[in-house]
Amino acid sequence: MRRAPIVLAATAAGLAAVLGFHTQKLRTSVLSGLGTTATTSPPGGTGTTSGTAAGTPTTSTPSTSSPAGAHSALGADIQYQYGDLELKVTVTGSKITNVGLVVNDAFDPRSEQINAFAEPQLVSQTLQAQSANINGVSGATFTSQAYVQSLQAALDKLGFK
């Protein structure tokens, strides 16, 4: 009988903790689309990109080219511990000329701050190194790793060495 108040208090505390727990809604990119099929037609050719019913895009995204000789490709959509990241890389001749973020979803406000700080530095490092062999950003290790994976996937699609 002496344990009853302790057990009841512990149960009440546990129930209060469970009821007080708030989760954050998982955000997805507008570009990922659930159950949709997107078609991309580069100038001078055709290509398709399809997504599954679960909204996961396939990796057969074609590269595109513009009249000025610039070629672009989407990198892999990388889901990492703190978010989701996908890049679009543009190469002109044998030079990386632009890296843009297609999907940049962080799961929490702190990760958004880290990404906002790290991503311009990662783009700058890429344009300087002209490859996916970059140092990354201290304090944004997971973002840096996801960035490099998506970057390398896009460069592989473009046949960039």
Image (spheres, grey):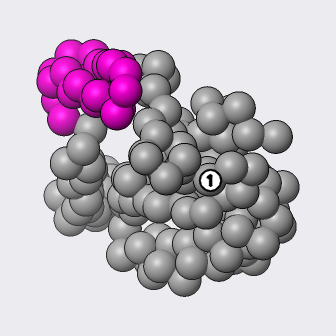
Above-or-below relation of 23 to 140: above
Above-or-below relation of 128 to 33: below
Toward the front, the furthest residue is: 67
Q: On the image, which quarter does residue 42 sit in?
A: top left
| In the foreground, 77 or 128 | 128
Q: Residue at x 24, y 44 (%)?
A: 31
Residue 44 appears in the picture as rendered: yes
Q: Which residue is mark 1?
A: 92
Q: In x, y percent, where is residue 43? A: 34, 33
Question: Relative to 114, is 101 on the left or the right?
Answer: left
Magenta residue check for 133: no
Question: Relative to 62, is 122 on the left or the right?
Answer: right
Q: In x, y percent, where is residue 99? A: 55, 61
Q: On the image, which quarter does residue 104 sit in?
A: bottom left
Q: Residue at x 74, y 40 (%)?
A: 160
SS for dot 1: strand
| In the foreground, 19 or 15 | 19
Magenta residue check for 46: yes
Query: Is the C terminus in the top left, top right, bottom left or bottom right quadrant?
Result: top right
